[in-house]
């Protein structure tokens, strides 16, 4: 049986630690097991393949004898520019190196809401860094077409049902009770504020058609009040034909 190495990657802040916990739950998968005992750990100190990401030749010395399924997690870029620690791991070359060692390589691209990513990266990394991952993704797809895309939001929304739907070439312990513990608090919540009202609410309540985006700051045209029924809330009494 050919051994499998799944490479989990995505923009900074898109959920590497979250997914690493989920994929480390299965006993038949060699992953970031120490992360299961801590809420967060620094990648450079404890991710099992951290040294290999810095020096691809170390992959040749890595012990792949204990399991049939392995996964590693890394974001692009890593570090902070102002501190002199920012660098971009080469996902494509890492995957090709593993492939040359006889591993079946699976690329998993993780994603998160783009606005939350921008805010999180700006707060922690001092800038939006997603452009670096877009560049890396081009190279990844050249060597490994059609990577599997994983959604942060779908994981929190559907939990075990979403995990059961994934076919990544290695076992996922969707049934483990720790899944609920890992997903107990959605980190997106702190970025989201309640919206009391929105211009589109009128359309949902009355059936008013919107020919332009009422949320756009340049919207200047008045909203029509023609509705499906004369008795709709806010109706002018002029029904659409």
Image (cartoon, rainbow, N blue to C red):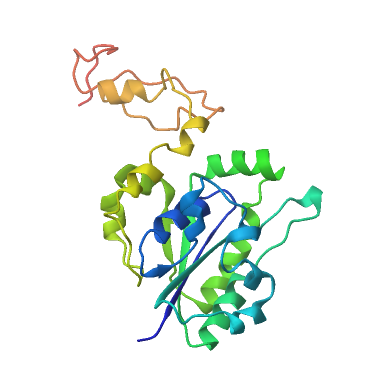
Query: Residue at coordinates 64% horizontally, 59% vertically from top-left?
Result: 45
Q: Quadrant of residue 171?
A: bottom left
- Left/right of residue 180 with respect to residue 222 in the rendered view: left
User: Does residue 140 appear in this view?
Assistant: yes
Q: Nearer the viewer, residue 239 or 86?
A: 86
Query: Residue at coordinates 65% horizontally, 69% vertically from top-left?
Result: 51
| The N terminus, quarter of image | bottom left
185 in relation to 22, above or below = above
- Left/right of residue 55 with respect to residue 191 in the rendered view: right
Find residue 188 and report its horizontal and vertical position in percent.
47, 37
130 in relation to 2, above or below = above
Find residue 52 and report its horizontal and vertical position in percent.
63, 73
Q: Quadrant of residue 238?
A: top left
Q: Nearer the viewer, residue 94 or 68?
A: 68
Find residue 224 and report its horizontal and vertical position in percent.
36, 21
Q: Quadrant of residue 2?
A: bottom left
Query: Residue at coordinates 48% horizontally, 50% vertically from top-left?
Result: 37
Find residue 46 and report its horizontal and vertical position in percent.
60, 60
């Amino acid at each position: 049986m050919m051994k499998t190495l799944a490479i989990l990657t995505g923009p900074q802040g898109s959920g590497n630690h979250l997914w690493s916990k989920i994929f480390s739950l299965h006993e038949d998968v060699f992953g970031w097991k120490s992360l299961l005992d801590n809420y967060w750990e620094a990648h450079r100190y404890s991710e099992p393949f951290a040294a290999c990401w810095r020096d691809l030749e170390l992959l040749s010395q890595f012990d792949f004898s204990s399991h049939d399924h392995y996964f590693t997690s890394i974001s692009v870029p890593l570090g902070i520019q102002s501190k002199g620690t920012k660098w971009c791991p080469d996902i494509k070359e890492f995957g090709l190196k593993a492939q040359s060692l006889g591993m079946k390589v699976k690329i998993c691209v993780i994603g998160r809401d783009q606005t939350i990513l921008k805010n999180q990266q700006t707060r922690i990394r001092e800038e939006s860094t997603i452009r670096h991952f877009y560049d890396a993704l081009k190279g990844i797809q050249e060597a490994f077409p059609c990577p599997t895309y994983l959604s942060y939001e779908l994981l929190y929304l559907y939990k075990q049902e979403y995990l059961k739907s994934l076919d990544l070439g290695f076992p996922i312990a969707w049934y483990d009770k720790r899944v609920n513990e890992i997903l107990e608090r959605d980190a997106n919540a702190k970025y989201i504020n309640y919206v009391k009202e929105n211009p589109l609410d009128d359309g949902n309540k009355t059936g008013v058609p919107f020919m332009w985006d009422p949320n756009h700051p340049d919207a200047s045209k008045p909203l029509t009040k023609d509705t499906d029924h004369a008795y709709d809330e806010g109706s002018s009494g002029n029904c659409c034909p």
